[in-house]
């Protein structure tokens, strides 16, 4: 290994590492995008869970959409016990879901910025010495920004800050069914060094098929095919040798 070697961290998604030369480049920002219900939250949470349980890397899971109780209940279906991980200080779940009253100064109105959010995330990273961070999902905040330029700058700042100590950051982003005009996905895809897209496409009148595509991964020779993916009783699994029937 020399200064030019890219260190990789295992994703914890069976089959996915085979598509990306062994894992995500350590300390990078990765975007997991897809339409509603494609499995973004499950994939992101599995990345944190497996990181903590298999690779001994503590993780911070910031949730801006689903309340932690729902996440814990859903992940338990896959045998992933998040509560236990929290008790072992291998997981810090940061609840910024709309159901919960937000702490003061989280976002500094009226000139909305993300420095409050950044500080909170850093305090959780420091507390458990986290190596992996998930924000599910940053794009939910996009509408609060006055302009696309400010949005891009703030998203860039927070990603750069979280990854500066080699922490790997995974963001989720919903690809809207119709374009909202803000182009949030384009901004996130631009500033992330990797983009993974999840699909759940209709393949006949009566069935849909899940698949996954590595749209980009800087510094990596990745698959350019769309591969089959399933949500099994053990979580998300990718079949590297199987090309999606819908593609
Ligand atoms: N135990 C399970 N077994 C099989 N499939 C499941 C299970 N739990 C959830 N799913 C599937 O996963 C989907 C939800 O996945 P997830 O919450 O990760 O999607 P998402 O992309 O984050 O959606 P959203 O954009 O709404 O946040 C469900 O709609 C369902 O199809
Ligand atoms: Mg989700």
Image: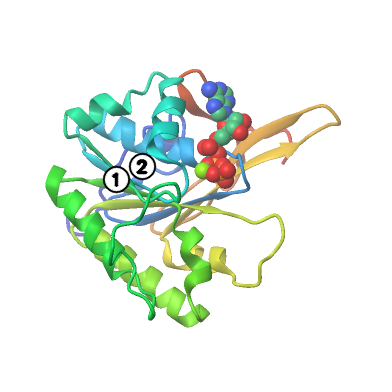
Point 50% across, 18% down: residue? 233
Q: Quadrant of residue 246?
A: top right
Query: Who is closer to the viewer here, 151 or 6?
Result: 151
Residue 111 lies, in percent from the top left, at 38, 81
Q: Which residue is mark 2?
A: 23
Q: Residues within 10 Å of mark 1 (few under 14, many from 20)?
A: some
Q: Is residue 152 above or below residue 106?
A: below
Q: Is residue 247 left or right of residue 72?
A: right
Residue in the picture at 72% in, 41% down:
247
Q: Is residue 108 above or below residue 137?
A: below
Residue 241 in view = no
From the image, tell me which residue sits under label 1. 8
Marks 2 and 1 in Cβ contact (< 8 Å): yes
State the residue in front, 156 or 55. Answer: 156
Is 236 left, or right, of 212 in this rendering?
Answer: left
Whole-percent x, y for residue 88 in the image: 16, 28
The mark nearer the N terminus, 2 or 1, is: 1
Colouring used for the render = rainbow
- Coordinates of residue 2 in the picture (x, y in percent): 17, 54
């Amino acid at each position: 290994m020399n200064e030019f070697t890219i260190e990789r961290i295992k994703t914890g998604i069976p089959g996915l590492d085979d598509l990306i030369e062994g894992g995500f480049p350590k300390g990078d920002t990765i975007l997991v995008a897809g339409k509603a219900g494609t499995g973004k939250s499950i994939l992101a949470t599995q990345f944190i869970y497996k990181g903590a349980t298999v690779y001994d890397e503590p993780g911070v899971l910031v949730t801006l959409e689903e309340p932690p109780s729902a996440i814990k209940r859903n992940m338990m279906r896959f045998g992933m016990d998040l509560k236990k991980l929290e008790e072992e200080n291998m997981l810090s779940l940061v609840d910024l879901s709309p159901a919960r009253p937000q702490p003061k100064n989280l976002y500094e109105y009226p000139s909305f910025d993300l420095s409050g959010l950044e500080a909170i995330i850093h305090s959780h990273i420091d507390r458990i010495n986290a190596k992996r961070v998930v924000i599910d999902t940053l794009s939910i905040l996009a509408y609060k920004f006055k302009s696309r330029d400010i949005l891009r700058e703030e998203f860039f700042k927070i990603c750069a800050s979280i990854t500066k100590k080699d922490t790997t950051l995974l963001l989720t982003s919903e690809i809207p069914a119709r374009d909202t005009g803000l182009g949030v996905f384009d901004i996130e895809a631009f500033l992330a060094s990797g983009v993974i897209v999840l699909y759940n496409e209709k393949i006949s009148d009566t069935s849909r098929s899940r698949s996954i595509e590595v749209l980009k991964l800087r510094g990596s020779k990745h698959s350019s095919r769309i591969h089959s993916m399933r949500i099994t009783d053990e979580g998300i699994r990718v079949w590297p040798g199987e090309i999606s029937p819908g593609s």
